[in-house]
Image (cartoon, coloured by chain):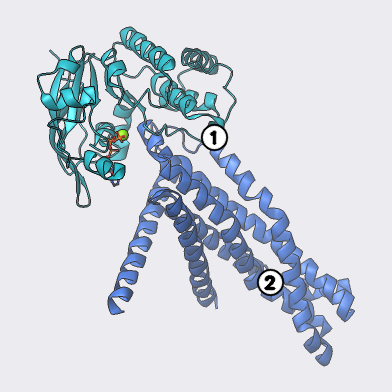
Chain colours: A blue, B cyan
Amino acid sequence: MISGIGAAALRIAQEVGGIVLLTGQVLRALVPRPGAGAWIDGRELWKNLYKMGNRSVPIVVLTAFFAGALMMLQAGPFVKKFGATGLAGWGAGYAVLREIGPILIALMFSGRVGANNTAELSTMTVTEQLDGLRALAIDPVRFLVVPRVIAMVAMLVALTVIGDLVALVGAAVVGKAMLEIDFSTMYYSIVDNLKPYDFLHGVYKSIAFGFAIAMSSCYFGVTVRGGAVGVGKAVNAAVVASAVSIMLLDFFLTYLSA
Amino acid sequence: MTEPAIRISEVHKAYGSRRVLDGISLDLARGTKLGLIGPAASGKSVLCKLVCGLEQPDRGEIEVFGERIVGKREVDLGPLRRRIGMLFQNYALFDFLTVEQNVAFPLEQGAAGTLSAETIAERVAARLRAVGLAGSEAKLTAELSGGMKKRVGIARATVADAELVIYDEPSAGLDPVTTQKIYDLLSADQARTGATVLAISSDVAALAGFVDEIAFLYDHRVVYRGPAATIADAPNALVRQFVRGDLEGPLDQAGPGMASLDRSIK
Ligand SMILES: Nc1ncnc2c1ncn2[C@@H]1O[C@H](COP(=O)(O)OP(=O)(O)OP(=O)(O)O)[C@@H](O)[C@H]1O
Ligand SMILES: [Mg+2]
């Protein structure tokens, strides 16, 4: 029992260490160096931006809309009871922009894009494609990992901004349909009460979440061992690690800004 | 006389408790062709990766073109690796690229933009014709048969006219006629470029027609090395038995590879 906990702790420490090392390599690769070949492979970057961003929009729009709608639905009875319709937009907006939006979309993103990325990278690893790159004097971190990290951070931020807006629309629609709050009341409630910082706070979070998802999904992808079974395990580990780090980061970022 | 293309001295390599190479030494003069044979899982592929610096030995020295590669950082291995062409046993083709892009890849990346797009396209087309894959340029590698993948791998390993070419099983998965064609092509390439060649194959007869010398890897070491033409009559009884495929002989039944094979038959 105790040795089991010890072994698990050791493995976690090892993996955290590995992720930190890979992060170091990624940051170093971001500094352009003459003679080391192309800075970032444009083809890889565009492909990943498209794949990770564009194709995630529908699912993000769907979840965000209902998340916003649900916020309003839950708050509805209290708003009614106290007649605080003027504060409904502020309440929903505050929660969506600072918390629900970034975290919900990050979790969606890690399940969809992060898992996909780990599966893809780990398949490449077990089929020796990373060794194939190395044999051609190409650094797999620079060529494969860096474009993915950039694409994931950029796209999660973009999706979070889109998701925030859609969630607010969802809240307004429910407010109008069920609580008879005018769109204009809702609009001024949001604009008058929320500061740009509330929005930025969520954007900062999504940068951190995007980086965490990217690093853990790439780490488990490039360190996979043992064929198809290994790929499955890697995807599993990456999703768990992403979720845990999103929660931890969220706590610390919220704590620091409070 | 210049230094050899490859010099391996006293190299040890183990994975966990599994010994793979145990004090192996091997020299390969520039411009010569060496074949490497040995039982399954004797460490032939591992040796190829060591020469390329893709794996690090536990002990020993490896020099390629006079440059020590043991303990070197990845970035510092780059210039040397550009002089080496490598065919992986399992192809290691890039599945995010088409056949044509796979073969063009070493030219696009390696020469760091010194070649024009037309030159690259020309050389790639010529290479694909040479390995009999004209018409498959736009296919993704997942759509290819095993033999086709092997030939794409060969095209990719040879397109940049490397000074040292390592072929890990160039004829595995190819029919006898294609095998002969491929070996003819590899011979012609070598005659043209004067490259040093290290080739691994289980098809000893076809290999012997291609290389100058053959080394036999057994029991974690090179136990024999001699001219390829007379390999079937080698003075070493182990080699004779292995090459002829005799069931009776001195090959250790409990030796690497053989033991597990034996068990799986029973
Ligand atoms: N990355 C690795 N991790 C653990 N063990 C390995 C690894 N690579 C190779 N081995 C082990 O090293 C031994 C030699 O493998 P290698 O692939 O070099 O054999 P081989 O001589 O090329 O065999 P074959 O003729 O079947 O291709 C095998 O027992 C293999 O299990
Ligand atoms: Mg092998």
Q: Mark 1, mark 2: which one is toward the viewer?
A: 1
| Location of the N terminus of chain A (image quadrant) | bottom left
Q: Residues within 10 Å of mark 2 (few under 14, many from 20)?
A: many
Q: Which mark is residue B36?
A: none
| Location of the C terminus of chain A (image quadrant) | bottom right
* Left or right of A48 on screen, residue A233: left
Viewer-nearest residue: A238 or B91: B91
Residue indicated by mark 2: A96
Dot 2: element: helix
- For the point 49% across and 12% down, which residue is it? B126
The three-letter amino acid code for the residue at tag 2 is Val
**Marks 1 & 2, CB-CB < 8 Å contact:** no
Query: Would you say the beta carbon of the disc 2 residue lies within 8 angstroms of ligand 1?
Result: no
* Left or right of B253 on screen, residue A17: right
The three-letter amino acid code for the residue at tag 1 is Ala
Q: Residues within 10 Å of mark 1 (few under 14, many from 20)?
A: some
Q: Is residue B130 above or below residue A242?
A: above
Question: Looking at this rendering, what residue extends furthest in the bottom direction?
Answer: A81
Q: CA distance from mark 1 to mark 2?
A: 44 Å
Please report, as a chain letter, where disc 2 is located. A
Residue indicated by mark 1: B142
- For the point 14% across and 30% down, which residue is it? B249
Q: Position of residue A13 (x, y in %)?
A: 34, 66
Please identify the quarter of the rendering in which residue A107 is found: bottom right
Please identify the quarter of the rendering in which residue B232 is found: top left
Q: Position of residue B239 (x, y in %)?
A: 16, 25
Please report, as a chain letter, where disc 1 is located. B
Dot 1: element: helix
Q: Position of residue B266 (x, y in %)?
A: 28, 44
On the same chain: label 1 and label 2? no
* Residue B227 visible at all: no
